[in-house]
């Protein structure tokens, strides 16, 4: 397969890889493609523009060999961790390369940052990687894959399996717990049973990981093609309760449902949430809002006199919950504001009726502001009823609202397309009193603006055309046959 690893690269990446291979071989050093890029080639996934390589050379020598291979720039990514960065080519031909010295990780204590020792073997380097699918190296010289942990077979089976003893791997770096769920969401893999059991045992250690790193993984998980499977993995392993404790009540629904302790309908809250996430477009704000839109339902559940379950106020309570959660994870302010608004408004589009007034539609659009498109997409995704006719009716409401607003916008756009000269300007220009001639000139100018022949602010050109029109009209009035507008009477001239 190694031949095809190189063959799968973009031509400029392949060229860079070959130049590097020659330089490192000449220097007597090993050089392999490793990690995500090898995995993604084997999975036939789209490849990044960059190259990740591992070498037996120490950073200083790596720098020298990279220069010898013709790198245009060298930068220090983290010499302490053994990584040297290079840039080959520029603009569209640019290839960024990171070459890392084989590492052995060791863990002198329970600190956040593992200590890294440089200068192991390729096998030792692969041994410290997280999952078998990520622990494959590909030689650049026809040497084949180096795959001591059976990563290629696991990729073929779509199984995510920790390298070696899963408890050890997760204890070394608890971020791997979340990476596992993220790869489930991104790659559509299932968790190997022993790996999953170890994730459940080690879930509490995720507390040691900084919120920024947790957030980065959750963001990737949420926009994954199999996000629902990733979230389900988080729930089953208890990681959800650690990473997103605000969602514990929602997840508890699923657990109570599984025990038969809740009426069937209520268990569906979690399943519903997963379906809405899957159906929402894979953009971060909408996906976060999909995850959180009903999170306050368990907190606001009530039963009315007729025995009907209701969730009064779950939107504003959910908006507060979302804000709290996203603030705790240190998301940026724009994300907090957008998701908060989406959760607060998520129920409104499906209340749309065809007889809503234009101003009712405008009011909702104003409330939504910049999240308008996300809101419509979220509302469309928030339709999961088992009953076909209910689903269709809800979808029709969202589509109706979308079309209504689009019409208002088209009208507003049309309103902006006006004659560059108004009636007063025309009267001043021709020193004429008001009359139907103004309407005819203005209509003619506006037509040209709509047709794109005349810019709405081009008064000079508009004046030139207006003079032509009025002159033609005067000619027509004095016996010619040209008139402004069709069949209209000549303008009243004082
Ligand atoms: P992506 O780039 O899509 O996030 P990736 O697998 O390339 O996925 P990176 O974070 O770029 O992930 O890491 C590159 C490689 O480094 C991985 O494929 C894996 O071999 C190794 N790696 C990264 N993070 C860890 C970790 N926390 N523990 C062990 N190995 C890791
Ligand atoms: Mg990567």
Image (cartoon, rainbow, N blue to C red):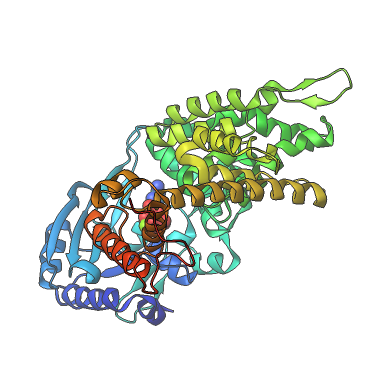
Q: Nearer the viewer, residue 141 or 398?
A: 398
In percent of width and height, residue 171 lies at: 46, 39
Above or below, comparing residue 30 to residue 254 in the picture? below
Q: Nearer the viewer, residue 342 or 221?
A: 342
Q: Nearer the viewer, residue 264 or 421?
A: 421
Name the residue at 58% across, 48% down: 377
In percent of width and height, residue 8 lies at: 39, 77
Can residue 168 be seen at all in this image of the molecule? no
Q: Is residue 320 left or right of residue 39?
A: right
Can residue 332 be seen at all in this image of the molecule? yes
Q: Is residue 100 left or right of residue 126?
A: left
Dividing the image into 4 quarters, which one contains the N terminus? Answer: bottom left
Name the residue at 46% across, 31% down: 326
In percent of width and height, residue 479 lies at: 36, 72
Q: Where ligand 1 lies, by image quadrant?
A: bottom left
Above or below, comparing residue 469 to residue 223 in the picture? below
């Amino acid at each position: 397969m190694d031949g095809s690893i190189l063959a799968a690269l973009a031509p400029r990446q392949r060229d860079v890889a070959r130049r590097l291979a020659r330089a490192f071989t000449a220097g007597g050093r090993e050089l392999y493609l490793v990690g995500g890029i090898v995995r993604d080639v084997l999975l036939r996934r789209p490849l990044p523009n960059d190259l990740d390589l591992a070498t037996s050379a120490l950073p200083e020598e790596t720098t020298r060999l990279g220069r010898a291979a013709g790198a245009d720039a060298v930068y220090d990514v983290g010499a302490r961790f053994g990584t040297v960065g290079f840039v080959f080519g520029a603009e569209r031909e640019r290839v960024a390369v990171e070459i890392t010295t084989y590492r052995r990780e060791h863990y002198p204590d329970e600190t956040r940052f593992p200590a890294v020792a440089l200068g192991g073997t390729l096998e030792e380097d692969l041994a410290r990687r997280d999952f078998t699918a990520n622990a494959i190296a590909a030689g650049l010289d026809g040497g084949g894959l180096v795959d001591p942990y059976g990563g290629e077979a696991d990729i073929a089976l779509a199984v995510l399996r920790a390298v070696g003893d899963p408890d050890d791997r997760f204890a070394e770096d608890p971020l791997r717990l979340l990476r596992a769920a993220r790869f489930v969401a991104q790659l559509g893999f299932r968790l190997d049973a022993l790996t999953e059991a170890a994730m459940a045992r080690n879930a509490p250690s995720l507390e040691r990981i900084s919120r920024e790193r947790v957030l980065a993984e959750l963001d990737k998980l949420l926009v994954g093609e199999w996000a629902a499977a990733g979230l389900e993995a988080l729930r089953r392993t208890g990681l959800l309760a650690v990473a997103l404790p605000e969602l514990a009540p929602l997840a508890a629904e699923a657990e109570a449902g599984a025990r038969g302790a809740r009426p069937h309908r209520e268990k569906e809250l979690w399943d519903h949430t997963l379906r809405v996430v899957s159906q929402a477009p894979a953009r971060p704000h909408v996906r976060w809002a999909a995850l959180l839109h009903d999170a306050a339902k368990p907190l606001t559940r009530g039963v009315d006199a007729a025995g009907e379950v209701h969730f009064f106020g779950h939107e504003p309570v959910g908006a507060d919950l979302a804000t709290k959660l996203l603030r705790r994870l240190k998301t940026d302010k724009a994300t907090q504001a957008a998701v908060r608004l989406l959760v607060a408004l998520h129920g409104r589009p499906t209340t749309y009726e065809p007889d809503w007034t234009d101003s009712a539609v405008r009011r909702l659009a104003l409330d939504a502001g910049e999240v308008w498109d996300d809101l419509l997409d979220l509302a469309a995704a928030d339709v999961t009823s088992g009953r076909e006719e209910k689903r269709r009716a809800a979808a029709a409401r969202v589509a109706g609202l979308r079309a209504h607003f689009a019409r208002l916008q088209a009208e507003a756009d049309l309103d902006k397309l006006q004659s560059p000269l108004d009636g007063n300007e025309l009267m001043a220009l021709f020193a004429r009193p008001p009359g139907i001639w103004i309407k005819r000139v203005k209509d003619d100018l506006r037509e040209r603006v709509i047709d794109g022949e005349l810019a709405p602010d081009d008064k000079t050109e508009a004046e030139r055309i207006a003079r032509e029109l009025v002159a033609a009209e005067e000619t027509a009035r004095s016996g010619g046959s040209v008139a402004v507008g069709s069949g209209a009477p000549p303008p009243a001239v004082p």
